[in-house]
Image (tube, helix red, strand yellow):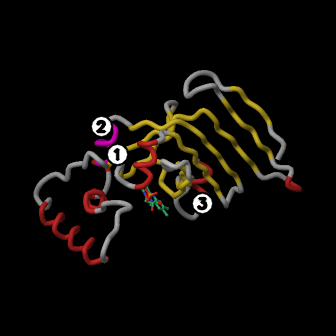
């Protein structure tokens, strides 16, 4: 990530996050990776969005990071849990006030009749919260992907790329390392 931060033109932490809906049909979208530690990988979103509903029905996800400037890919599969309220509060409070207002104003993934409706809602909320703290809505929080598989792919000459996969039986415990044919 440090190398990508130095060389990617923007959003080195953008991940393409895949989930499945109630009928088992895949869905995918970009979100920003906001945390990584031994427990897993964290992103923030509206739990009432399409992805939130999909995760509520089936708490499993996969994501891919592709750094074009480095020609490297990382693939992750894992089970998903909500992060603690304290973690979500800390991240929410670190965001710019406009982003906090945006999180309240946006009924993410639901129909919006016009851009003006959203802008009016933002203006009303900005007036409402001018002199008081902007609280994190309960539906806006972090999700943690707890990995059971992580694969690193790196470009090599003549398309004989390196692929190293780490797997484990569940979301805890030791990893087994395996090299794969490209
Ligand atoms: C570069 C980029 C970063 C994004 N980051 C986030 C994010 O961190 N959280 C989020 O909820 N949506 C983010 N989005 C918007 C999502 O891709 C998506 O439009 C939105 O979350 C609704 O997805 P859903 O309908 O599948 O729930 C981002 C989009 C882009 C292009």
Q: Are marks 1 and 2 in contact (CB under 8 Å)?
A: yes
Crowding at mark 1 (Cα within 10 Å: few <14, some 14-19, many 20+): many
The reply to whether discs 1 and 3 touch (Cβ–Cβ < 8 Å) is no
Q: Nearer the viewer, residue 46 or 7?
A: 46
* Rendered position, 127 above or below 56: below
Can you tell which quarter of the image residue 105 is in?
A: bottom left
Q: Which residue is mark 1?
A: 141
Q: Position of residue 69 (x, y in %)?
A: 67, 60
**Magenta region: which residues?**
86-92
Q: Earlier in the sequence, mark 1 or mark 3?
A: 3
Q: In the figure, residue 167 lies in which quadrant?
A: top right
- Residue indicated by mark 2: 85
Q: Is residue 93 left or right of residue 153?
A: left
Q: Which residue is mark 3?
A: 8
- In this rendering, would 155 be left or right of 84? right
User: Which SS class for mark 3?
Assistant: loop
Specify the principal SS of the magenta part. Answer: helix
Residue 57 is covered by the magenta coloring: no
Q: Tag 2: Cα neighbours inside 10 Å, few (<14), some, or many (≥20)?
A: few
The x, y position of residue 4, in whole percent, is 61, 53
x and y percentages locating residue 67 in the rendered image = 64, 56
- Position in image of residue 103 (x %, y %): 30, 57
Distance Cα–Cα, label 1 vs label 2: 8 Å
Could you tell me which residue is drawn at 82 percent across and 47 percent down?
182
Q: Report helix, strand or loop for mark 2.
A: helix
- Which quarter of the frame holds ligand 1? bottom left
């Amino acid at each position: 990530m440090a190398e990508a931060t130095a060389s990617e033109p923007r959003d080195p932490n953008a991940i393409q996050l895949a989930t499945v809906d109630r009928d088992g049909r895949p869905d995918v979208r970009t979100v920003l990776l906001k945390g990584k530690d031994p427990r897993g990988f964290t992103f923030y979103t509206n739990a009432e969005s399409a992805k939130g509903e999909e995760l509520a029905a089936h708490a499993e996800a996969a994501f891919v990071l592709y750094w074009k400037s480095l020609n490297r890919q990382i693939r992750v599969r894992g089970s998903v849990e909500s992060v603690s309220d304290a973690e979500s509060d800390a991240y929410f409070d670190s965001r710019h006030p406009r982003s906090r207002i945006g999180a309240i104003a946006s009924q993410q993934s639901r129909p919006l009749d016009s851009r003006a409706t959203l802008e009016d809602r933002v203006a009303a909320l900005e007036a409402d919260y001018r002199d008081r703290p902007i609280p994190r809505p309960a539906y806006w929080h972090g999700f943690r992907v707890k990995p059971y598989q992580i694969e690193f792919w790196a470009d090599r000459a003549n398309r004989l790329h390196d692929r190293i996969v780490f797997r484990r039986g569940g979301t805890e415990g030791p990893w087994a390392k395996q090299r794969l044919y490209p």
